[in-house]
Image (cartoon, helix red, strand yellow):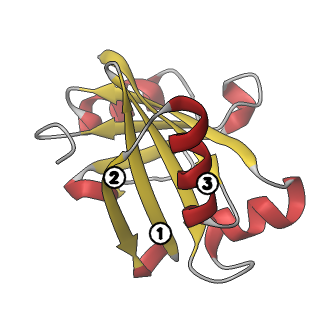
């Protein structure tokens, strides 16, 4: 079951410049910065109320899904993520509703989460991530 909006993923070409902008414009500082070599990402989490802003920088130009997104679309909102209490059960439910998942099984996400993406054709062309967390981002 969906619990809340977990985060909004925003693709950026330069994480440090983006963090400076978010600080100057919105007064936001990151609560955590993490590098995920496996997915070619450097990620900063910024807290806005109960929702996180996830700034996503490819570790090298064109690398990984975010690098390809930036090459095709430029910087901007890349996905929205909904928190679920049981990712396996939610994926089974969606499968029974004939909703195609981009990820056939859950995979590791940032900050020790488990994630899976829904194919955008089912969500009005919005890439949607489901995320299961054992705790809040620290």
Q: What residue sits right under mark 2 in the picture?
A: 106
- The image shows residue 109 at horizontal and vertical percentages of 34, 57
Q: Nearer the viewer, residue 34 or 109?
A: 34
Q: Viewer-nearest of labels 3 and 1?
A: 3
The residue most toward the front is: 24
100 or 96, nearer to the observer = 100
Q: Residue at x 78, y 61 (%)?
A: 70
Separation of residues labelled 2 and 3 (CA atoms)? 29 Å
Q: Which residue is mark 3?
A: 18
State the separation of the CA atoms marked 2 and 1: 21 Å
- Viewer-side label of 2, 3: 3
Q: Picture quarter containing residue 108?
A: bottom left
On the image, numbered disc 1 is attached to which residue? Answer: 42
Judge whether 17 appears above or below 82 on screen.
Answer: below
* Neighbour tally class for label 2: few under 14, some 14-19, many 20 plus, Cα within 10 Å: some
Q: Is residue 29 left or right of residue 123?
A: left
- Residue 32: quarter of image: bottom left
Q: Position of residue 68 (x, y in %)?
A: 76, 68
Q: Residue at x 65, y 65 (%)?
A: 65
Toward the viewer: 88 or 6? 6
Query: Which of disc 3 and disc 2 is earlier in sequence?
Result: 3
């Amino acid at each position: 079951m969906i619990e809340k909006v977990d985060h909004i993923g925003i693709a950026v070409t330069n994480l440090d410049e983006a963090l400076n902008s978010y600080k100057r414009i919105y007064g936001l500082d990151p609560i955590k910065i993490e590098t995920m070599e496996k997915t070619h990402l450097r990620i900063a989490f910024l807290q806005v109320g109960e929702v996180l802003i996830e700034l996503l920088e490819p570790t090298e130009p064109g690398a990984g899904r975010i690098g390809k997104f930036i090459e095709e679309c430029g910087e901007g909102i890349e996905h929205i993520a909904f928190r679920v209490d049981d990712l396996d059960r939610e994926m089974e439910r969606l499968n029974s509703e004939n909703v195609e998942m981009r990820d056939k099984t859950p995979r590791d996400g940032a900050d020790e989460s488990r994630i899976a993406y829904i194919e955008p054709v089912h969500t009005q062309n919005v890439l949607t991530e489901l995320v299961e967390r054992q705790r809040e981002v620290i």
